[in-house]
Image (cartoon, rainbow, N blue to C red):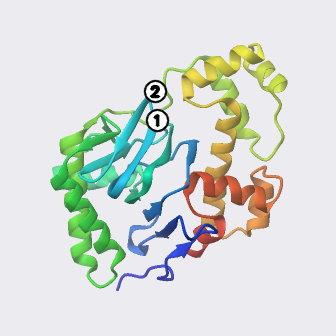
């Protein structure tokens, strides 16, 4: 029988406005699933190490992606490839959506089993697609995943939806998830930030590592990654925090190891980017 985390929806401190439920079916390992209603919460620019695939079931929301504003509502699918910078905000009265966060290995394995080939990780060609039929099928499969009574039906539905999504809305590009065409200076700055997540980093030091002036570094770093150096650092800290929480690290230790000033600092930035608090995220594991 499918084992899930405690089966109660988790309300945030603005319970009149936003509601979230986050869970992970054990048989899928690290496949995160999320359903939420957001009337107020605004996501800052951030990335995921996984794909983001989902659909809005009510209302409308918008997000910046590759320099353009994307608006999505019922009948549309949302696709974010790993590493792509995006934000998110409600439009009008807000929105409800259902999302999954499959790893590249997970999605590649689904396609390998479906096609008998190993073509590398797929890349969704646009951040949204109007496909009412597939959006309905995705929402139904997602509800089946949330309902622990029919795991076989849920597995079949999820696999079918993902295969259709890739075939209709993605291409396969070997080496997709490697870093883009970044200058050596930006790569040095990224490597330095990744190696010093638990430390205070100033622009003068980072610019010296990169071999550029501070202002020039900020400009080329943002152009290469979609984020400023500081936003990149915070984003990587949140990714590391999620990893350590999954390993069972105490939240106070996670805050320290990831360079947050204290646990409340971790909570604020973690929830801003993932929509749930570290404590709610830990409850799934």
In the picture, measured across the screen, residue 248 lies left or right of residue 174, that is right
Residue 270: give x, y in percent of width and height.
64, 56
- Horizontal placement of 19 versus 156: left or right? right
Q: Is residue 224 left or right of residue 215?
A: left
Q: Check the image and report above or below for 159 versus 64.
A: below
User: Which residue is depicted at the point 36% across and 75% down?
Assistant: 146
Read off the residue under disc 1: 64
> Quick check: 42 above or below 33?
above
> Who's the residue at 31% across and 41% down the image?
128
Q: Looking at the picture, how far across and down is residue 244, in whole percent?
A: 66, 61
Observer able to see residue 284: no
Residue 198: tell me if it is visible.
Answer: yes
Give the number of the disc on residue 219: none
Q: What is the x, y in percent for residue 212? A: 74, 13
SS of the residue at dot 2? loop
Q: Residues within 10 Å of mark 2 (few under 14, many from 20)?
A: few
Element under disc 1: strand
Q: Position of residue 42 (x, y in %)?
A: 55, 49
Query: What is the distance, in whole Å, between disc 1 and disc 2 at their CAs?
Result: 6 Å
Q: If the image is split into quadrants, where does the C terminus sit?
A: bottom right
Q: Are marks 1 and 2 in contact (CB under 8 Å)?
A: yes
Q: Which residue is mark 2?
A: 67
Give above or below for 169 relative to 173. Answer: below
> Which quarter of the figure is the N terminus placed in?
bottom left
Along the line of sight, which residue is nearer the eye, 102 or 234? 234
């Amino acid at each position: 029988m499918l084992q899930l985390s405690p089966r109660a929806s988790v309300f945030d401190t603005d319970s009149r406005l936003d509601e979230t439920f986050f869970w992970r079916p054990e048989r899928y390992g690290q496949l995160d699933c999320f359903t939420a209603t957001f009337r107020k919460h605004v996501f800052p620019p951030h990335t995921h190490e996984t794909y983001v695939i989902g659909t809005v079931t009510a209302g409308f929301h918008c997000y910046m992606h590759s320099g353009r504003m994307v608006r999505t509502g019922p009948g549309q699918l949302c696709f974010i490839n790993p590493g792509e910078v995006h934000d998110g905000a409600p439009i009008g009265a807000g929105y409800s959506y259902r999302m999954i966060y499959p790893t590249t290995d997970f999605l590649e394995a689904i396609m390998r089993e479906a096609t008998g080939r190993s073509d590398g990780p797929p890349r969704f060609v646009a951040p949204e697609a109007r496909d009412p039929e597939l959006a309905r099928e995705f929402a139904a499969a997602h509800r089946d995943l949330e309902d622990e009574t029919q795991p076989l039906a849920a597995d079949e539905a999820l696999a079918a939806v993902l295969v259709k999504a890739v075939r209709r809305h993605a291409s396969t590009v070997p080496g997709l998830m490697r870093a883009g065409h970044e200058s050596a200076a930006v790569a040095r700055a990224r490597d330095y930030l990744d190696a010093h997540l638990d430390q205070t980093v100033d622009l003068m030091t980072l610019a010296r590592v990169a071999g550029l002036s501070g202002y020039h570094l900020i400009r080329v770093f943002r152009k290469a990654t979609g984020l400023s150096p500081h936003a990149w650092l915070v984003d990587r800290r949140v990714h590391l925090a999620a990893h350590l929480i999954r390993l069972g690290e105490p939240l106070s230790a996670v805050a320290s190891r990831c360079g947050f000033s204290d646990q409340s600092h971790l909570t604020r930035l973690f929830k801003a980017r993932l929509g749930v608090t570290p404590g709610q995220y830990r409850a799934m594991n």
